Image (cartoon, helix red, strand yellow):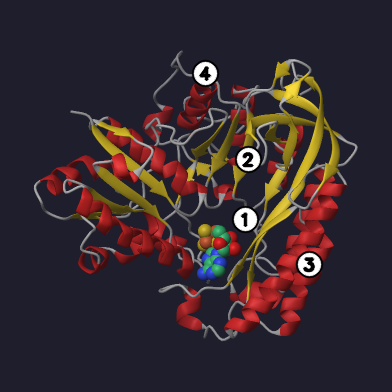
Amino acid sequence: MQKKVYIESYGCQMNVSDSEVVASILAKDGYTAVKSAEEADLVLLNTCSIREKAEYTVMQRINEMNSLKARNKGLKVGVLGCMAERMREDLLEKKKVVDLVVGPDAYRTLPDLLEKVGTGQKAVNVLLSREETYGEIVPVRLDTNGVTAFVTIMRGCDNMCAFCVVPFTRGRERSRDPQSIVDECRDLVAKGYKEVTLLGQNVDSYKWRPTPSASDAGADSTRSVDPSGRPANDTTGATDFADLLELVALACPTLRIRYSTSHPKDMTDKVLVVMAKYANICKYIHLPVQSGSSAVLKRMNRGYDRAWYLDRMASIRRHMPDCSISTDIIAGFCGETEEEHQETLSLMNEVGYDMAFMFKYSERPKTLAARKYPDDVPEEVKGRRLAEIIEAQKLSSAKRMASYVGQDHEVLIEGVSKRSAENMFGRNSQNSIVIVARDLGGLELRPGMFVHARITSSTAGSLQGEVTGIVDEAFASA
Ligand code: 5AD
Ligand code: SF4
């Protein structure tokens, strides 16, 4: 009998991508993925620890599993991801409803762990690995629109930002074999996907060094790039992120390529040159600044200061005047003064972000900040500062979006607009949402189509456009 698994993802895109790897591992073990917890024999919650609130949300959801289990006696419940790693056996002890706890590097052991769970025991594996990249596993796409997909290129993080729990939950940084990345992208193209987002905690430190056995493998005619994944002109033997971007752009010329996340201290001009060179690489960079104050950045252990960040901005604009930029900002980090907060507002004003993710600082156990600095900005001050940051971003977004009005943009249609079935939504290269009419003089727009759209109006969150034509050959101008 087919077993049914329901996987629910919380937190970042990396978790969404990991859930697809988990679905693939479980498919080999006889599970099909279903769309609701009610119809499943196994519910897996792929969890996030980035802020306390994220963990609280998951804890509530775990509690809800009690009533599901009461209705479905055979149901098993597992916790995956960052909370599994951070809380380990604690979760099994404190939440009786949980049968299974598996950390981000242990998903290959799921079939064995489930066998144990099947005999009525609890199972846990939270071992972190220095090597695991799930490189050769072909993910099973969950909740897919059939148009856009994520491809993980590296795992873990070595940066040790003072506020961040990720190095503790996801372990050391390691990069995936470029050949397997290119193969996965090619496979997506063959399946009709039109856009891919290459994912990593810090893509700029992507580095693949061929092992002796890999480069000794010799000529293999089934491989489309050098077996090591190395571009012909590379003499160091390593593939860096710029090389990888170029490999994917060349191997999949009709595929739109995005990536996330960059780190200001590591973002090189070499990456910007590659981005500018290929029309199929989107002109959009997510470059988390966290704070506009050099003193706060130092306490955060970010490895750059305000001047360095602004220099990176200037370089982006030099290489790609049409590039959009988004960021992450934390309000009320340890010891943040009013002046330091004002510096964040002034930096936002100077950069003019298209979009931002904005958070109140939330202390995380074990992190450098938790050990070294008191969480001393009062809650109401954090709240007020965050509100000011959000307000500043609203103005900035509205201004940036208004600047697109009158321009022609290439838009990839992703689906039917949530507001009205008469409209479709898609994204331009800059990653802004563009709403267009579904009916194009008798022709109905479908997800996956590339269209030319003239931008007619804007809000802070989206653009309205008029389709002026269908793109026959995507990125032909490259
Ligand atoms: N508190 C608040 N925000 C955080 N982030 C990471 N850790 C914390 C924390 N402890 C934010 C950062 C990061 C984004 C993914 O989440 O801005 O870039
Ligand atoms: Fe956290 Fe810094 Fe790693 Fe991003 S780069 S995940 S902020 S430690």
Q: CA distance from mark 4 to mark 1?
A: 32 Å
**Lower position in the chain sequence, tag 3 or tag 1:** 1
Secondary structure of the residue carrying tag 2 is loop
Secondary structure under badge 4? Answer: helix
Kind of residue at disc 1: His
Ligand 1 positioned in quadrant: bottom right
Residue furthest right in the image? 406
- Are circles 2 and 4 on residues that touch, CB within 8 Å? no
Answer yes or no: is residue 218 visible. yes
Which quadrant of the structure image shows residue 70?
bottom left
Q: CA distance from mark 2 to mark 4?
A: 28 Å
Q: Amino acid at mark 2?
A: Lys
Q: Is residue 58 left or right of residue 391?
A: left
How far apart in space, not on screen, are marks 2 and 1 (Cα)? 33 Å
Q: Residue furthest top?
A: 221
Kindly indicate the quadrant of the structure image that contains residue 18: top left
Residue type at numbered disc 3: Leu
Q: Check disc 1 and report its element: helix, strand or loop.
A: loop
Closer-to-camera residue (194/44): 44
Instruction: Say which mark, if any, is on residue 334.
Output: none
- Is the residue marked by circle 2 packed among few (<14), some (14-19), or many (20+) residues within 10 Å? few
Determine which residue is flagged by label 4: 190
Residue 117 percent location from the top left of the image: 15, 48
